[in-house]
Image (spheres, helix red, strand yellow):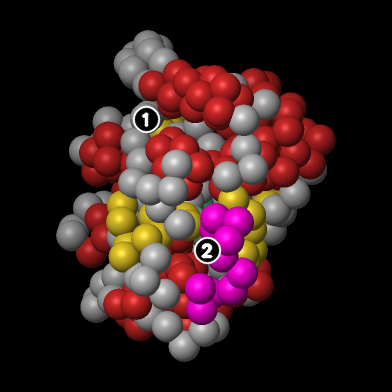
Amino acid sequence: MKKKLLSSILALSLAFSAVSCGKKGESGDDGNTVKIAYLPITHSLAVLEEAEELEEKSGVKVELVKYGSWAELLDALNSNRVDGASVLIELAMKSKQEGIGLKAVALGHRDGNVIVVSNDIASAADLKGKTFAIPHRQSSHNILLNDALATAGLTVDDVNVTELAPTEMPSALASGQIDGYCVAEPFGAMGVSLGAGKVLFSSEELWEDSLCCGLVLTDKFIDERPDDAKEFVESYKAAGNALDKEKAKETAKKYLSQSDEVLDISLRWISYNDLDITEDIYSTLVEKVKAYGLSDNPPAYEDFVKNDF
Ligand code: ZN
């Protein structure tokens, strides 16, 4: 297992870092290109799929800009170096709260997260006193950890919560450095595939219609190019509706450099249809964000979510 683990981790690290600055600025601003930032995760497959389809249909060209971390991606988004991004929605909410001009226009995906724990943990109650990794405090992974602990009457005060880079989580679990984690896919599936851990909860068992990633566009892009923004969002939602398991795997193979086994496990947990951010699901998110201390003052639906293209 060790050899497999090391080679998988190496492949993953390369996948994450190799192209992180390769496409930036390549096409220049010809006025017809939409620059979209993404991380190579299954949670951004809808935008990767759309990029291929949109130019054929409408002549609007999508330039995908790959980043190696949420921090780098957020920096590009917040400084208008890209027109939009597929990003953890809580990070975008935080940016909005801090005065950055952006709107969430669709979900990145539906469901698609798991709580992975070491094989000796049988229930949420067993997490007491253990170390649990999340990618960022501002994430649905943090919320799902809180939800999972609540099923056993526990809170984050009962565990050691640590922030780790997603690529490090499967190996940290395998080595016993952490006892569990929750993070964007396919890193949960990777831990399972390696035999380092198992799924304790899937996201829908803890939080029905959970939000995680959102497609976010800058106000600058929406204001300056309203027709392109409309075309982009409509085409994105259509691409999501058409993204069945087979197509998702095809797209993932192209962009994610992951094994068939990891992708097969991961893609079982996620779907991409019906990507509207409704007021209902957003208000549940806002409640959780407040209850679990991610933010006291998250943006109002009407200020942050745009559905009226
Ligand atoms: Zn996500």
User: Which image quadrant: the N terminus?
Assistant: top right
Q: Nearer the viewer, residue 247 or 207?
A: 207
- Give the label, 1 or 2, closer to the camera: 1
The residue furthest left is 98
Q: Is residue 163 magenta?
A: no
**Mark 1 secondary-structure assignment:** loop
Give how far across and how far down residue 208 sits, in percent.
63, 74
Q: Which amino acid, by three-letter code, is at mark 1?
A: Gly
Q: Mark 1 — residue?
A: 68
Give how far across and how far down residue 294 sits, in percent.
29, 70
- Label 2 within 8 A of ligand 1 by Cβ: no
Seen at 34% across and 18% down, the residue is 21
Please indicate whether residue 264 sits to the left or right of residue 108 in the image. Answer: right
Seen at 81% across and 35% down, the residue is 246
Please indicate whether residue 164 sits to the left or right of residue 107 in the image. Answer: left
Give how far across and how far down residue 98 sits, in percent.
18, 60
Q: Mark 2 — residue?
A: 211
On screen, residue 291 above or below 130: below
**Residue 120 figure quarter:** bottom right
Span shown in magenta: 114-126
**Residue 206 figure quarter:** bottom right
**Mark 2 secondary-structure assignment:** loop
Question: Crowdedness of circle 1 by 10 Å Cα count: few (<14), some, many (20+)?
Answer: many
Q: Which amino acid, by three-letter code, is at mark 2?
A: Leu
Distance from the alpha carbon under mark 1 to that under mark 2: 22 Å
Q: Nearer the viewer, residue 210 or 14?
A: 14
**Residue 235 figure quarter:** top right
